[in-house]
Image (tube, rainbow, N blue to C red):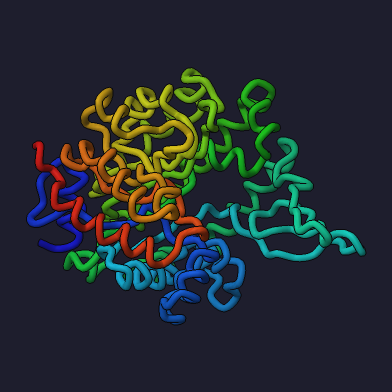
């Protein structure tokens, strides 16, 4: 059985031969990999497992990686396989108005005001090390109009048929052979608006500027339904996940009705296009407690969720009882990994009913924290291999 087949069977509520997939939820946190290097991980492994944002910020040689990030995923896959995970090749597709050159706008004795790679103005206070958002990308409809025009010019420059093929096609042979699965990350319809407007102005905009929000989402949909589809037709990713982060610890940041209008209706158009082109499963990445919105997500065509934040109240055992065919990636309390062997063993006992029920790839419920030792992480991975021998046992 190939790695790709194993993942598809694991998430497909089947019992794979031998064991289910052993994978991590997200690419690693740089601070964590640096600790691991100090504790014995080879430098070439730790240093090349870069965070996608940091990699893009420093990547001036290959400007295509600004929007079509692929190369960085090789280092992450090497890091994960060194640790004992199954090979997963992580790729991104970035919208044409979501990357900018960083530069300093003003510097004083006390702070640095700069534009970051997302186009926001942020202020860094030298003495405290605190960074705050000073000005969002979009403050009014005129800002959005200019940003769309900028996006149109970037599409023409960087999203050509030739560039898309050149960037993603080298992954096709290994993926078709089953050497690795492909996990494609894109930004969702709530996420993009929040990033452009800022958290509080975004929430007011549902009532003050709904037409602009719909125009933003229509623009995003147009890019995905054209340029992104070329990537999907080429590679047929096994998992696509949309970043949304539309919940906090106390619940969702928008009502079910607002979700259906501003997010769900776009999913209902986009997800069938993914499936028609061979995508395995469509997941949503949202932190916080989103229990209230699960029926709305399912109605919109979503197959499952990650990372299932335990400390925000997302208990996969309870959710699986309510939604038996819902799939998960993650759901393992990351704090238990840092706490050591006994805590790790208890957490595997807690989630074992979901592992045995199938449709689930256990992983940390967010990036593994720098408080985690390499020894404890290796123990967690060894126990994960053992646990996944029970994958689908109850099917």
Measuring 74% from the left and 47% from the top, which residue is drawn there?
133
Q: Tell me where residue 7 appears, x and y as whole percent.
A: 21, 53
Image quadrant for the C terminus? Answer: top left
The image shows residue 317, relative to residue 106, as above or below, that is above
Can residue 195 be spotted in the picture? yes
Measuring 7% from the left and 55% from the top, which residue is drawn there?
17
Image quadrant for the N terminus? Answer: bottom left
The image shows residue 141, relative to residue 377, as above or below, that is above
Q: Is residue 5 left or right of residue 213?
A: left
Give 90 or 149, whichever is nearer the viewer: 90
The image shows residue 199, relative to residue 45, as above or below, that is above
Q: Residue furthest right?
A: 109
Give 87 or 308, whichever is nearer the viewer: 308
Measuring 41% from the left and 76% from the top, which residue is drawn there?
41
Q: Is residue 344 left or right of residue 6?
A: right
Q: Residue furthest top?
A: 257
Can residue 225 be spotted in the picture? no
The image shows residue 173, relative to residue 211, as above or below, that is below
Q: Tell me where residue 120 appears, x and y as whole percent.
A: 71, 51
Measuring 39% from the left and 39% from the top, which residue is drawn there?
308
Q: Tell me where residue 51 appears, x and y as whole percent.
A: 51, 64
Q: Is residue 80 left or right of residue 141?
A: left
Q: Tell me where residue 393 appears, x and y as whole percent.
A: 10, 42
Rendering quarter of residue 2 = bottom left
């Amino acid at each position: 059985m190939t790695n790709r087949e194993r993942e598809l069977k694991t998430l497909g509520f089947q019992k794979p031969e031998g064991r289910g997939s052993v994978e991590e939820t997200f690419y690693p946190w740089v601070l964590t990999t640096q600790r691991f290097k100090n504790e014995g991980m080879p430098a070439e492994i730790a240093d090349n497992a870069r965070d996608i944002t940091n990699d893009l910020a420093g990547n001036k040689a290959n400007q295509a990686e600004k929007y079509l990030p692929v190369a960085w995923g090789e280092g992450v896959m090497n890091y994960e396989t060194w640790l004992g995970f199954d090979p997963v090749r992580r790729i991104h597709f970035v919208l044409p108005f979501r990357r900018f050159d960083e530069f300093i706008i003003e510097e004083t004795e006390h702070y640095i005001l700069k534009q970051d790679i997302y186009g926001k103005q942020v202020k860094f206070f030298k003495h405290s090390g605190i960074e705050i958002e000073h000005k969002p990308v979009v403050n009014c409809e005129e800002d959005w109009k200019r940003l769309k025009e900028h996006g149109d010019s970037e599409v023409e420059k960087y999203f050509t048929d030739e560039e898309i093929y050149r960037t993603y096609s080298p992954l096709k042979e290994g993926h078709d052979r089953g050497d690795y699965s492909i996990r494609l990350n894109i930004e969702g319809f709530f996420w993009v608006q929040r990033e452009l407007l800022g958290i509080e102005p975004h929430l007011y905009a549902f009532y003050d500027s709904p037409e602009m929000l719909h125009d933003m989402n229509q623009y995003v949909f147009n890019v995905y339904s054209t340029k992104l589809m070329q990537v999907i037709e080429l590679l047929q990713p096994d998992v696509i996940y949309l970043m949304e982060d539309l919940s906090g610890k106390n619940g969702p940041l928008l009502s079910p009705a607002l979700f259906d209008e501003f997010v769900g209706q776009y999913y209902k158009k986009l997800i069938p296009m993914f499936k028609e082109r061979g995508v395995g499963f469509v997941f949503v990445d949202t932190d916080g407690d989103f229990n209230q919105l699960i029926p709305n997500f399912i109605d919109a065509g979503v197959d499952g969720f990650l990372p299932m934040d335990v400390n925000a109240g997302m208990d996969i055992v309870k959710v699986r009882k309510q939604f038996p065919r819902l799939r998960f990636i993650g759901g393992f309390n990351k704090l238990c990994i840092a706490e050591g062997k006994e805590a790790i063993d208890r957490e595997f006992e807690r989630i074992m009913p979901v592992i045995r029920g199938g449709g689930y790839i256990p992983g940390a419920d967010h990036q593994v924290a720098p408080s985690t030792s390499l020894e404890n992480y290796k123990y967690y991975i060894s126990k994960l291999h053992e646990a996944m021998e029970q994958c689908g046992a109850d099917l």
